[in-house]
Image (cartoon, grey):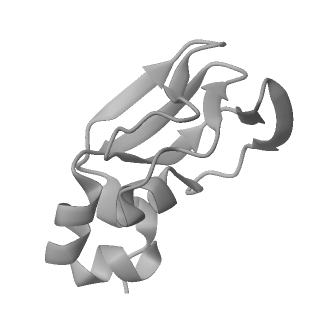
Amino acid sequence: MPTLSDLTADLPAQPLRPGEAITTEGGRSGRLYVLESGTLSVERGGVVLTRINTPGAVVGEMAALLDIPHSATVRAETVAQVRVLDDAAARLSQNAELALHI
């Protein structure tokens, strides 16, 4: 069975500079992101709740799948790179193998 990294290798890569946000609390993007490298911080109300630095970690999936606003702002804490899945809900409904990993 392919890994999540295998299944997202053809998605566009987005390099991030420290401080650059990929989701904004209360915003909507329809995207989900798969971390390739670096560290992301998850903030709510300006308070850092956690940091994510595990390659393959998925960000933004709940908002995309449930069609709800993002519950937190996620920003690069260091130089980072993510793979971007635009229109995530529609794309996952067409790719069961990828959806199982999410």
* 58 or 48, nearer to the observer: 48
- At which x and y percent is residue 34? 47, 50
Q: Which residue does the image show at 34% across and 38% down from the upper left?
A: 29
- Image check: 91 left or right of 24? left
Q: Work out whether 2 lies above or below 38.
A: below
* 61 or 102, nearer to the observer: 61
Q: Work out whether 53 lies above or below 96.
A: above
- At which x and y percent is residue 1? 37, 87
Q: Image quarter for residue 48?
A: top right
Q: Image quarter for residue 3?
A: bottom left
Q: Which residue does the image show at 26% across and 46% down from the upper left?
A: 11
Q: Which residue does the image show at 31% across and 52% down from the upper left?
A: 9
- Image check: 55 left or right of 93? right
Q: Work out whether 84 lies above or below 100.
A: above
- At which x and y percent is residue 38? 66, 32
In the rendered image, the residue lying farthest to the bottom is 1
